[in-house]
Image (cartoon, rainbow, N blue to C red):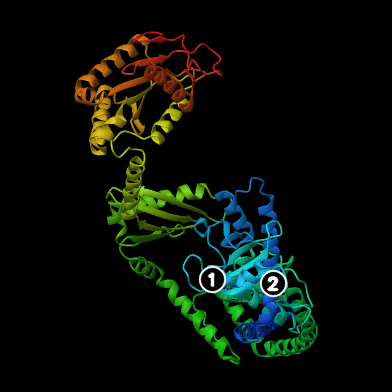
Amino acid sequence: MKKKILIALVLVLCVSSTIVSLVFWRLFLNQEIESERYTGVTVNKQIIDNINSSEIKDEKAKELFEDDYRNRLHFAEFLIDSDTDGHISNSEWKNILDLLEVSNINIVDANGTIVQSSKPKNIGQNFYNNEKFSEFIPLLENREASDFHANYDGVSSATDTNNVMYAGIKHKKTGGIIQIEIDPDLLEQYKSMSSISSYVASIPTKSYRTIFVMNSTNAEILGITTNNEQVLEMEKPIETLRSLVGKPGIVKINGKSQFAIIDEYEDKFIGTLVKVDDLKENVKNYMVKFIGYIFFLSVMIILLIYILIDKLVLTDIDRINKRLVNFVEGRTDIKFIPEAKRTEELSLLADNLNKVIGVISSKGERITSIANMLGEGFESYEYYADINQIYFSENLPKLMGVTSEEVEDRVRRKFEEGKERLNGKESVEAIETLKCKSGRIIKVRRVVFENLSYAFFEDITDSVERETNLSENLKIEKEKSYVDHLTGLYNRKKIQEEVEKFCVENKEPNGVMVIMDLDNFKLVNDKAGHQTGDILLQEFANLIKRQFRDSDIKARLGGDEFVIFMPNYFKKEIINAKIENFLDVVRRELSEYYVKYKLSVSVGIAYMGPECDNFEDLYKCADAAMYVAKRHGKDGFYINVENNMCMKSECNNCKVNCTRRTLLFGEE
């Protein structure tokens, strides 16, 4: 035993050293990360303070701004001069404005008159007569030092308020001016960019740390420290950085894991990035020294523990073990009392072992008491095969609707069934749902061992009823989604599903599709109103319901178009009689509409066949037949015998003579 303890202590040394190393590795790494987080938060705050400070270099920003918009004006001059017909359309103006990212462009001739403009109302205004354009007269008269002029406090041509900037260049081709209107906020962005870029670049930092400022709308880097990588490549940069605002974390940037501390101020991300690999390298150096100290200390402690265990514990454990062997062999008069009594813990162990003997004798009563504590809706039993004793909660027979004897018989039968499935296994488990004689539905979780079985019962009647009700409600809601709310007929989605299902379930499907269209229905809506039109659709739908079988699938596809699918084969004579009778009923029942609005019904019919064995093809064939019925005077029907999808005789792509059909109301 001493040898095993020594081996165990050595294992403890190894495991504990590993655990301690891992813990301190994490501790040191967290400390480094926390230090970098504090540094990042401080630097980010300083950058934000700098953004708010008054040290923005206005003049440098204006230089950048003017250079940019001088280039844009020259590009505008190129686009305008490239226009060959001398007239710029609205769509061309829009493209030019989008390319230049400006709000308006005026083309001014040598006399100071606006001759073209993206805002037509500006055309005809003269710079000499309009005070808001007077600043550009020196440029017009070649009195400027350069060919460019900018007005930073201009008056809007739309609102006559000082809220725009103007910039213009001399138009070489005409001697006039090309002038643009610019949002004044853009100059502020240039000022911000100029200040941020120079400030961030001047921040001294370690090589593994990157400090940057990024535009939070377009991911443009506004400033970055100079002693590291100048690009920040990552997936979805704006979403990624925004998710880290106020929540520092690890992110993949430039192909490496980096610890990111991100703040968002106005339209900018201010961030500090630290390469995780460099942090780990620092921690590794700390750990080499630390592990050496820990290992030496652990060896000394384990040796001391081994000596103390041998003197204070092992002797008493050996005595207790001998008495346990006697107890297992059948002696019940054993008393566990450490003779040395050198430790309080061993004395307590001996007392507890003595209590175990007393507990065994009251096992039956204890199991019954625990079972009764399960409460209403939960029951249990335990079966000890060696002593043929079954203990179950007193409410179990009532829950199952049987007698106590029947419960015991069932427990023994289930135990024998479970033993047959053991096949060398330690135990088998089973879960089953039963409907009892009491009418309750219960879930049983049963475990069977070689000589022991126990089970738990749960009354799930209420939950099953709730699930059943929910399933029924879902079924009702699904049916609603298949119904046209105005007529109560099915919609296109439902009839398509039913036809496709019919085709799948039948190897050689036979059926007939009938498409009906109310001729001149629009006239009813236009003259009598949509409410009358809706009533007409409902009346027509009711006629379809009455005149066709329950087994026929009836649907409204939308507007005044209705479809019926009859899932059987019918001879043409039967279909003729069926449709003729239906049209007679419609003419009689809806005669008022026929007289007032010249309403009629055109019907197209197609048979399902090898070349037409799906909903879409069958629909196209029936629709083509309806077109023929309409073309031949309406108020009739046509059967597409050969299942052509195109029935227009003038169609050049039709491969057969579309007019060679039997029209039931006459011959073509």
Where's residue 479, x and y in %?
A: 34, 40
Identify the secondary structure beneath mark 2: loop
Where's residue 190, x and y in %?
A: 65, 74
Residue 650 visible, this angle: yes
In the depicted view, which residue is nearer to us: 226 or 161? 161
Type of amino acid at the residue the image marks with label 2: Arg
Tell me the residue at 44%/72% (across/down): 360
Where's residue 391, x and y in %?
A: 37, 61
Q: Is residue 19 above or below residue 239?
A: below
Quarter of the image where one finds residue 634: top left
Q: Quadrant of the N terminus?
A: bottom right
629 sits left or right of 547 in the view: right
Among the two numbered marks 1 and 2 on one chain, the one whose residue lies closer to the N terminus: 1
In the depicted view, which residue is nearer to us: 176 or 373? 176
Quarter of the image where one finds residue 591: top left
Identify the secondary structure beneath mark 1: helix
Crowd around label 2: few <14 · some 14–19 · many ≥20 (10 Å): few
Q: Is residue 339 above or below residue 498?
A: below
Type of amino acid at the residue the image marks with label 1: Lys
Tell me the residue at 56%/69% (across/down): 133
- To which residue does mark 2 refer? 143
Tell me the residue at 39%/20% (across/down): 626
